[in-house]
Image: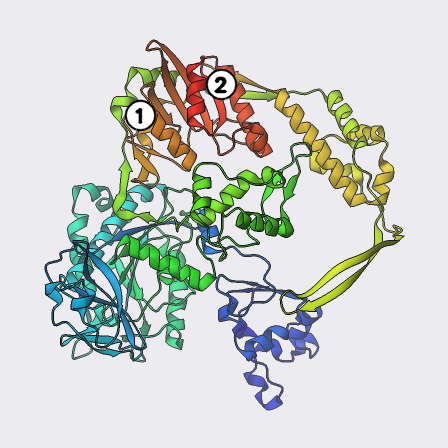
Amino acid sequence: MIINIDAFRKSFEDPEKENKANVIHRPNDRLNGYRPIEFIQQTNPIVIIDEPQSVDTTPKSKEAIASLNPLCTLRYSATHVDKYNMVYRLDAVDAYNQKLVKKIEVLSVRSEESFNLPYIKLLEVKEGKAKIELDVESRGKVKRTTKTVKCGDDLYDISGERELYRGYIVEQIDWTEGNEYIEVNSHRLHVGGVIGDIDDDEIKRYQIRKTIEEHLNKELQLRPRGIKVLSLFFIDKVAHYRDYDKDGNPIKGKYAVMFEEEYKDLIQKPKYRPLWDDPGIDKDVEKAHNGYFAQDKKGRLKDTKGNTEADTDVYNLIMKDKERLLSLNEPLRFIFSHSALREGWDNPNVFQICTLKDSAGTYVSRRQEIGRGLRLAVDQNGERVHDDHVNILTVMANESYEEFVATLQKEIEEDTGIRFGKIEKHIFAKLVYVDEKTEEPMQMGYDLSVKLYEELKRNGYIDKHSMVTSELKKAIENYDLRLSSEFQPWLPAIVKEIKRHLQALPIKDGTKKKKVNVNMAVLNQEEFRQLWDKIKYKTVYSVDFDSEQLIDLCIAAIQEMKPIEKIRIVSRKGRVEIDHVTGVQAQVVSEKVEDYVSLHHTLPDVITELQNRTNLTRKTIVRILTGCKRLEDFKNNPQKFIEEVANIIQRQMRLLLKDGVKYYKIGDDAYYAVELFQNEELLAYLNDNAIPSEKSPFDHILYDSDVEERFAKRFEHDENVKVYVKLPSWFKIDTPIGSYNPDWALVIEKDGEEKLYFVLETKGQEWEDELRPGEAAKIAFARKHFQAIGTDVEFIGPENDVERFMLRALSR
């Protein structure tokens, strides 16, 4: 059952107060005088609490949850207040890297740095000190820099003796909550206030305009796909959006006026004509935006701090409107709300967030800002959209890209305990490699993770504070991480995990965003057409293997299986030691098998269990079981036997499947048309995930890894490479274990005459044996596919060294 804490928090033992208790706590005649909660208590429910930091933080709430008599309680939150027996952590960085939330891009909106006026901006005030931004001269160059100042400081000295700041003294610092300010040279600056810069309202207007522009661009892209686009404006003062005249009549605030003026101007541009003609978009600008704010008793909108009863009413209104907001038929697309909005609502289709902070407003963290728009988008059917080119959240920042990223990174470190650039003892425990012989996943575990941590420290890869050193960075960059043989099987996973901790937050700079265009000159080039004609064909495959051979292989493998012992009782004696350094520890000093447990329960249907796990016929399963002569092991431990035998059968099936799959070219009319390139919509971030290209059908090449970046740069500059393409996501090869998308196709000219055609798969690993079984199998199937189409194109992979690949290619 799903229940709100308020539905069972009020329980009163006093009969006179019984009518004030929740219904769940009151005796009910229809239940023979019992209280409903008593029936729940008898079931010992498993209680799952969502966002416990806002549910069970008071003694009354804890008492109410305990009154359910739960068997156990599971708490799910990204920001726990009280931590109990933590089991699993999916932190902000993991969620971002696993593509469980939108990617973030920051569009910096600020004036161009002009150093001809005494620029001062107040960023933060704490007890006795303030953080300001000013223009500092160092080594003959002026740069806008953040400095911490205290009362009496001379900005002339702090600025590097710039004459513009002569006489600018910090005269007063006031850190009264909600009214923080400093006085400099008789100028009073509140948080966010600035002197020596262009008018603050002009910056706000430009933020609004850029938000509308980004929104309309997103609508052109996503509306045809049935995805509603929403934009969210956070403001600190309701009066800036909705004010009242002397008679109490509502009038538009300055932000509402700015929005309507900029919206009317932008929507008239020819570029947005398709939106103007869309019947789902109302022509009335007033219907395009609205505000969600708390109200007083007269219905007037008012400012709040995010934790009042009036705020709760706003959240309820937003949640009730959530589905309506996602409809393409609803004209409302731009939402203004209070910057103090707590957790409790977000909308998956918020693609733009703009914070219009008032100079004297309250501080809102970057994490709070972006948290309202990180969920993956949904379409009109309510289906989650898993597309990297769709799921991008654009944040309009009135600070530089670098400042935003640094502040967000600092907040994540403070709020979650994550330390970027720090290697901790436990981080390798979850790493897994697949054993080549058994194809079983082998997890490192905590003890080996600690051992690896100590080895990294001995080798000088991390310092005494567990921070990465330049030696580790160099080893990772040069693919020269040296570890003992014990850790070699995990090496690719170790490198990947270290890279995850080395990197800063993967946030994109919106000012470097560029639409990737089709390079028609290359697309129509004869050499590219020849390459495409060799790789474009589709195939079908058939699966054929010898059942008798499978039975024989399975029997032989099961006969070599380790003995499955009876379930036993083991006694272990341990010595407990306690000291101030290690705490309480136990060391086993003796171990003894006391007895084997006799099985008195019914044996499971082993044939049906194995049939369900392998999809083989009952007849085949019976022949394998009777032929292996290991059924005594089944009696010893039925579940263990079923798991081991099923794994063996599946492994033998995979080996036979690899050889038993045959590919056939469908015909000359079944192929991927080259015109599909013109339908591709891609966005690149220069110097981040893309490089310019003159040899590809796109004017920029997008890459997903350091390996791909190295290959792209070499292809672009190597004279032997005539044309190349990063194969689009729609270029897929069907395999028995799912579709496969190769990385590259290219033409290499040898000795200025002969042309060689390749399809290439790049991976961090060098050999197929180092890949997961599924990845290795798909590569093997792709090789058969290209052999079947018979166009003299050679498939190579996996490959991680571009130099070696070029040498191999030119030696053909």
Compare residues 136 and 367 and report the one nearer the observer: 136
Q: Which of the 4 image quadrants contains residue 574?
A: bottom right
Q: Position of residue 27 (x, y in %)?
A: 65, 80
Quadrant of the frame with the N terminus: bottom right
Question: Is 111 above or below relative to 754?
Answer: below
Residue type, label 1: His
Q: Which mark is residue 717?
A: 1
Q: Which residue is disc 2 drawn over? A: 786
Residue type, label 2: Phe
Q: Is residue 181 left or right of residue 594?
A: left
Q: CA distance from mark 1 to mark 2?
A: 27 Å
Q: Position of residue 350 (x, y in %)?
A: 35, 54
Compare residues 18 and 227 and report the one nearer the observer: 227
Question: Is 774 above or below relative to 135?
Answer: above
The local secondary structure at tag 1 comes to: helix
User: Which mark is first along the chain, 2 or 1?
Assistant: 1
